[in-house]
Amino acid sequence: MYRIGLGGALLTILLAGCSAGQTPDEAPTPPSTSQRDACGADALNDYQGRRATESTLARLEEASDAERVRVVGPNQAVTMDYRAQRLNVKLDDRQRIVELTCG
């Protein structure tokens, strides 16, 4: 009898944890227009189509206003956090730069 009571109490606690009312993470709100180019990506469009070599990425970092550079390969998972001062360098499967964005 003690086992049944303990098992029932444990089951109740576990089920209560499932219905805690927390919602899943939502996508971040889009940045304001003043933040969209906070890293200077708009001025770097000449780099699109180039191979993402170490020297090219170093020049991108130097030429941008970015605090950091994040290189994103094709089908690569990335975090959803938005950092206006981060330059995202998106690559295709041939390691060519296809898009430069802030965030």
Image (cartoon, helix red, strand yellow):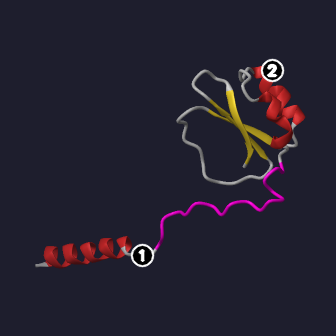
Q: Residue 98's quadrant in the figure?
A: top right
Residue under label 2, please give it: 55
Q: In this view, does 11 lie to the left or right of 103?
A: left
Q: Disc 2 and disc 1: Cα gap in Å?
A: 50 Å
User: What residue sits 70% from the left and 36% below the top?
Assistant: 99
Vertical comparison of 58 with 1: above or below: above
Q: Depth-wise, is mark 2 or mark 1 nearer the camera?
A: 2
Q: Is the magenta stretch mostly helix, strand or loop?
A: loop
Q: Is residue 43 magenta?
A: no
Residue type marked 2: Ser
Please state the horizontal and vertical placement of residue 29, each as a whole percent of the image.
66, 63
- The kind of secondary structure element at disc 1 is loop
User: What residue sits 82% from the left and 30% below the top?
Assistant: 46
Please state the horizontal and vertical placement of residue 33, each as a whole percent of the image.
80, 59
User: What residue sits 63% from the left and 61% below the top?
Assistant: 28
Is disc 2 in contact with disc 1, using a CB cutoff of under 8 Å? no
Q: Which of 16 and 2 is in front in this view?
A: 16
Residue under label 1, please give it: 20
Query: What's drawn in magenta, residue-wise?
Result: 22-38
